[in-house]
Image: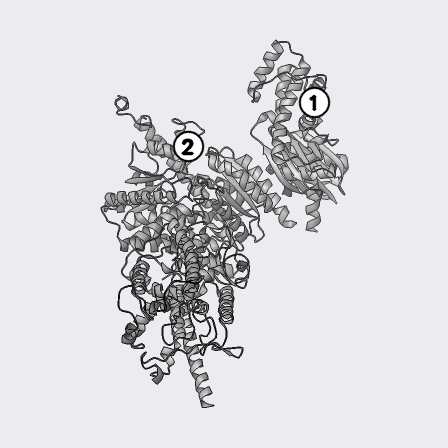
């Protein structure tokens, strides 16, 4: 049973090919202005690396914000459904899956089979999503990849009062002028983000184990802040960026099986 | 002196006439487009939509047939009495020979106009009504000789003041607690006062005969209304949006004709039920909406998403004062004396209401009971709790309803929105996820 | 032999007619807000006919009762219990006044008063002791109360029929009814137990005519009438006596001659107090629906044994409510003749009240399907329906 899952995110498109529920290929491209083309390219490259052709793929399921821009998909699934499925796949003990993407965040409650039981979305506040880190990294003049390790060096977080990303940026600038150590500012940034995400998850109710997916999950600084804020351990898969695509591919497998 | 300083001013600031005309024509064009689009979408979802629905499509057009009819009747001497909320005693208006018509605003575009004179935190329905007045958009509002405005919430209380610059406003004060005996006595007196005002405006006395006829007319309408609702209990033979359209047209249509047409529609639907000709698959997730008023045409935003998304959902019942609650409660008359009839009318409008503007020893238990009962009768799979940002009453009842629905093991989703079209994309994502969840639960 | 056949035939025809009547009403009355009330009126009329069967089927003009009138005395049911003669018969707790002619049952209150005093001991008429008779009467009261509850008040009682006819007259004249305030109703409710206690105690005291050796009332005519204190103030007695006298079933001259003549002095058949109270209750019942039922001691006795304590669980006829379906619209409270508020106020399940006469008007008028139900032995036999006007 070979299936594929496509996660058409706001920044990147991620694609995963599964064979008998094992990942045999994955690929990502920047969506840019032509997301459909990017999706096609991702598909071609993934097929090449797995030495397969299109006909070998029995079912493709798409998910993500641009779910309707994947012309070769056979069906669609919401991001929440995909996240739940992926969380249970990576960690069978997962009951809460938090997905922090580039521009929004969501939390999903799932059962051991990966079925979505409840969900909550934070789509209004950008300070709970990935672009916040990017904007702050720019303000601090630090490379995006270094933000995490930088923040771990800090013992405390500088005070950032603003509730909004736009104002937080000016807060950060004034903190730099006051010569606050960058590590502490970085930590404050991650703490602020973790606060947003945590309050969203609390609306859902925290059910261990908690799995964190999405591009931001790779950032050690954010993971540390979130662990601190939630007061519990958080599991992250090897490739958290591809979690949505994996979830979609698992759904594709199920649907292909049902068709048979 | 204080009253001197206000002389000649109005709540709504002066606007240039050409600006008013321009705005009115553009918003009117946009509104007509939205109405046509909604109807087209409903037709698309329901492939074999019955021909009888075309009558309701026609009446739902604010700027069409119904406006013309009311205008002609007004010129012939009849009075038009508008009402902004469901506490106005329609039977009394009908008994006096006047035309009752609802004047709530369902236009998103006029909400932006309302922003000019009140902050965005205010209920969008109020802002939209004021905006519509600013450009004299609403035909029913303009044609009203008087407007009954029950002061059920803060927004409406201040709305009276704004509109009273232009129209005769009769306000009514429903008590916030229904159970106290003095509350009912006070309400009955309010009804007496309104009766007097209606009689004075129309010049007709409300007698035993015409009140009895009006009550019986409304009872027939209630019967047709309930008949339509009853047909939604089983497999979906009518989509939720179409049923809501039929329900809402009763707010401004000629009641007798509406009753007749609704019965015709029900006859056809019953035939379809026998032949198993459904509007969508019988295993479509059955959704219930409860919350703030959802007025035609722009507020079709959320129902459109629910019934067009993938997976599809179907609205089988709602707890909306602009939906399945409109004509649900009849006036129950014991002895047909005029005092008893007035008592019956007063009680019907106050006691059966499920609006969260009421509270009691046990909170708003009427609403809780109604929702629980509907969920059981209509085999609802999930509930969408719809709140327009700015409505404190509905927003605050969410916690209680959620607790109860959790115990009943029914998923509920809190959907808050505004009078804007900008959040359709985001809303779609969330509703689709919710419907997916419902579908998955059905599978289990 | 022929007689038995004739009897059976007569009974069958009568029963057949009654069933036909019921069916006619159920089919003919289309308006759902009036159907049950029409049926109840019919059953009430049939009950009165059955209670006063003697007036219909005779025998008439019996020599030994000539002084009374053309009607026979009574065809009392249950005159023989377990081999002992029980001449006053079954006491169905409804107003089948002892003093009226043609009865099939006897008023419980009369029996309770009479068996305490004066007829405590055995005599030529009573071969059983007062205690035994009291036990039988009381036992019947309890059993019938448990089985029927105040259903008897709403569907069988002749005085109830009288009050309902007054209400219908008032409706025809389009006069609005009056309501009593909750406080007054509560007061009336409490006072009926006082009345029961009072007449039982008075019956004992006045029957003995002496307490601890001190004589209260001399052995005189007055004393004898005071042995049955309640019957001297009961409004039902003069109603039956006057009606029967007017219709010729009772010799009114004889009935009136049994009085002492002066105002407020007692007599067997009519007293001035009786008549005044009847007048007051009639006038009151014309404006206030079922006024007497709120204070009726007989109703109170039935309520005692069907609505309180352990009896509540045993009683067979109940009103139940499904909480979710109730919208608290208040129609049930408004249409209730004895102004019972428990149906409206109680949350759900058993909402039968002690004042409720089980006339089911609330169930008839409730516009929400399946909200109020009448349950007999746990099974619902009548539910509230969507009564909205039939399409013409």
For label 1, the SS is: helix
Percent across and percent down for residue B310 are 58, 44
* Relative to C241, residue A233 above or below: above
Horizontal side of residue B213 vs C332, given as left or right? left
User: Which residue: 50% across, 48% down?
Assistant: B369
* Relative to C112, residue B423 above or below: above
- Judging from the image, mark 2 belongs to the subunit labelled B
Horizontal side of residue A146 vs B370, given as left or right? right
Residue B111: numbered disc: 2
Residue A221: numbered disc: 1
Percent across and percent down for residue A139 are 62, 16
Q: Residues within 10 Å of mark 2 (few under 14, many from 20)?
A: many
Look at the numbered discs 2 and 1 and tell me whether their residues touch, using CB distance below 8 Å. no
Residue placed most toward the observer, C118 or C149: C118
Quadrant hosting residue B262: bottom left
Label 2 to label 1, Cα distance in Å? Answer: 43 Å
Percent across and percent down for residue A211 are 70, 33
Residue lying furthest top: A178
Residue placed most toward the observer, B306 or C86: C86
Residue lying furthest front: C213
Q: Residues within 10 Å of mark 1 (few under 14, many from 20)?
A: many
Mark yes or no: residue C119 visible: yes
For label 2, the SS is: helix
Could you tell me which quadrant the N terminus of chain B lies in?
Answer: top left
Mark yes or no: residue A130 visible: no
Horizontal side of residue B16 vs A52, given as left or right? left
């Amino acid at each position: 049973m070979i299936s594929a899952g496509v996660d058409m995110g706001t920044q990147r498109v991620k694609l995963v090919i599964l064979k008998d529920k094992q990942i045999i290929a994955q690929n990502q491209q920047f969506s840019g202005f032509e997301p459909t083309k990017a999706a096609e390219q991702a598909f071609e490259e993934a097929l090449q690396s797995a030495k397969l052709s299109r006909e070998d793929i029995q079912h493709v399921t798409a998910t993500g914000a641009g779910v309707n821009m994947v012309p070769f998909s056979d069906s669609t699934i919401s991001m929440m459904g995909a996240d739940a499925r992926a969380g249970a796949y990576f960690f069978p003990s997962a009951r809460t899956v938090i997905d922090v993407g580039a521009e929004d965040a969501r939390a999903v409650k799932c059962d051991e089979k990966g079925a979505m039981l409840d969900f909550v979305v934070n789509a209004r506040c950008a300070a709970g999503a990935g672009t916040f880190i990017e904007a702050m990294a720019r303000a601090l003049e630090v490379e995006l990849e270094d933000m995490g390790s930088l923040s771990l060096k800090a013992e405390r977080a500088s005070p950032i009062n603003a509730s909004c990303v736009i104002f937080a940026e000016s807060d950060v600038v004034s903190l730099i002028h006051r010569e606050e150590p960058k590590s502490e500012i970085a930590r404050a940034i991650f703490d602020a983000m973790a606060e947003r995400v945590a309050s969203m998850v609390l609306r859902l109710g925290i059910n261990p184990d908690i799995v964190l997916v999405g591009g931001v999950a790779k950032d050690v600084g954010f993971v540390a802040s979130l662990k601190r804020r939630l007061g519990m351990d958080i599991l992250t898969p090897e490739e958290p960026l591809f979690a949505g695509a994996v979830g979609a591919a698992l759904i594709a497998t199920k649907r292909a099986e049902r068709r048979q | 002196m204080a009253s001197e300083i206000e002389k000649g001013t109005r709540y709504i600031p002066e606007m240039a006439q050409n600006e008013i005309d321009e705005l009115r024509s553009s918003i009117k064009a946009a509104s007509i487009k939205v109405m046509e689009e909604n109807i087209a979408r409903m037709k698309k979802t329901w492939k074999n939509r019955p021909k009888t629905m075309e009558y309701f499509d026609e009446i739902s057009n604010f700027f069409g047939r119904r406006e013309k009819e009311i205008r002609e009747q007004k010129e012939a001497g009849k009075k038009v009495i508008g009402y902004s909320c469901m506490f106005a005693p329609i039977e009394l208006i009908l008994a006096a020979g006047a035309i009752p018509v609802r004047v709530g605003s369902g236009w998103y575009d006029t909400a932006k106009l309302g922003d000019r004179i009140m902050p965005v935190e205010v209920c969008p329905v109020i802002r939209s009504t004021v905006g519509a007045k600013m450009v004299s958009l609403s035909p029913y509002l303009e044609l009203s000789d008087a407007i009954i405005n029950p002061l059920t919430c803060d927004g409406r209380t201040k709305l009276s003041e704004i509109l009273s610059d232009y129209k005769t406003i009769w306000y009514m004060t429903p008590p916030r607690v229904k159970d106290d005996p003095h509350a009912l006595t006070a309400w009955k007196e309010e009804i007496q006062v309104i009766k007097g005002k209606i009689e004075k405006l129309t010049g007709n006395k409300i007698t035993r005969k015409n009140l009895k006829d009006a009550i019986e007319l409304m009872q027939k309408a209630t019967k047709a209304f309930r008949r339509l609702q009853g047909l939604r209990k089983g497999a979906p033979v009518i989509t939720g949006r179409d049923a809501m359209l039929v329900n809402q047209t009763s707010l401004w249509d000629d009641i007798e004709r509406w009753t007749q047409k609704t019965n015709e529609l029900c006859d056809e639907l019953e035939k379809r039920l026998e032949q198993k000709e459904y509007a969508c698959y019988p295993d479509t997730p059955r959704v219930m909406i409860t919350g703030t008023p959802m007025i035609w045409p722009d507020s079709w935003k959320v129902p459109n998403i629910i019934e067009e998304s993938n997976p599809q959902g179907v609205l089988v019942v709602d707890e909306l004062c602009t939906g399945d609650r409109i004509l649900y409660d009849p006036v129950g008359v014991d002895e047909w004396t005029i005092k008893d009839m007035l008592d019956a009318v007063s009680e019907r409008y106050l006691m059966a209401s499920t609006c969260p503007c009421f509270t009691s020893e046990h909170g708003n238990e009427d609403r809780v009971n109604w929702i629980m009962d509907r969920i059981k009768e209509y085999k609802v799979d999930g509930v969408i709790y719809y709140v327009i940002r700015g409505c404190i009453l509905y927003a605050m009842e969410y916690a209680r309803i959620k607790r109860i629905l959790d115990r009943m093991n029914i998923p509920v989703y809190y959907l808050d929105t505004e009078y804007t079209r900008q959040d359709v994309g985001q809303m779609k994502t969330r509703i689709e996820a919710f419907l997916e969840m419902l579908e998955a639960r059905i599978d289990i | 032999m022929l007689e038995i056949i004739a009897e059976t035939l007569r009974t069958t025809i009568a029963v057949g007619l009654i069933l036909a009547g019921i069916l006619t009403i159920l089919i003919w009355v289309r308006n759902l807000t009036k159907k049950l009330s029409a049926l109840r009126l019919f059953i009430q009329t049939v009950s009165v006919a059955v209670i006063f069967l003697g007036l219909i089927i005779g025998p008439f003009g019996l020599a030994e009762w000539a002084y009374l009138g053309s009607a026979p005395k009574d065809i009392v049911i249950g005159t023989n219990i377990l081999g002992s003669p029980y001449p006053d018969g079954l006491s169905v707790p409804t107003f089948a006044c002892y003093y009226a002619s043609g009865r099939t049952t006897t008023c419980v209150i009369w029996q309770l008063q009479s068996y305490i005093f004066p007829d405590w001991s055995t005599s030529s008429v009573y071969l059983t002791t007062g205690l035994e008779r009291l036990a039988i009467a009381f036992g019947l009261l309890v059993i019938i109360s448990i089985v029927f509850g105040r259903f008897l008040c709403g569907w069988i009682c002749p005085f109830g029929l009288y009050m309902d006819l007054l209400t219908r007259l008032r409706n025809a004249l389009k006069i609005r009814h009056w309501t009593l305030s909750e406080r007054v109703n509560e007061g009336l409710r409490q006072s009926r137990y006082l009345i029961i206690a009072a007449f039982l105690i008075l019956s004992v005291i006045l029957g003995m005519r002496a307490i601890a050796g001190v004589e209260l009332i001399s052995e005189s005519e007055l004393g004898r009438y005071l042995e049955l204190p309640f019957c001297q103030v009961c409004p039902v007695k003069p109603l039956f006596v006057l009606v029967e006298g007017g219709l010729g079933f009772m010799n009114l001259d004889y009935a009136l001659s049994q009085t002492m003549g002066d105002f407020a002095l007692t007599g067997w058949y009519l007293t001035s107090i009786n008549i005044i109270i009847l007048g007051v209750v009639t006038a009151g019942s014309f404006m206030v629906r079922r006024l007497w039922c709120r204070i009726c001691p007989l109703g109170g006795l039935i309520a005692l044994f069907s609505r309180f304590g352990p009896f509540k669980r045993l009683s067979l006829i109940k009103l139940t409510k499904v909480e979710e379906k109730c919208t608290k619209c208040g129609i049930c409270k408004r249409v209730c003749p004895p102004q019972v508020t428990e149906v409206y106020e109680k949350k759900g399940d058993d909402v039968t009240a002690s004042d409720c006469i089980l006339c089911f008007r609330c169930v008839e008028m409730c516009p929400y399907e399946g909200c109020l139900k009448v349950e007999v032995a746990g099974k619902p036999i009548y539910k509230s329906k969507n009564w909205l006007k039939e399409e013409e």
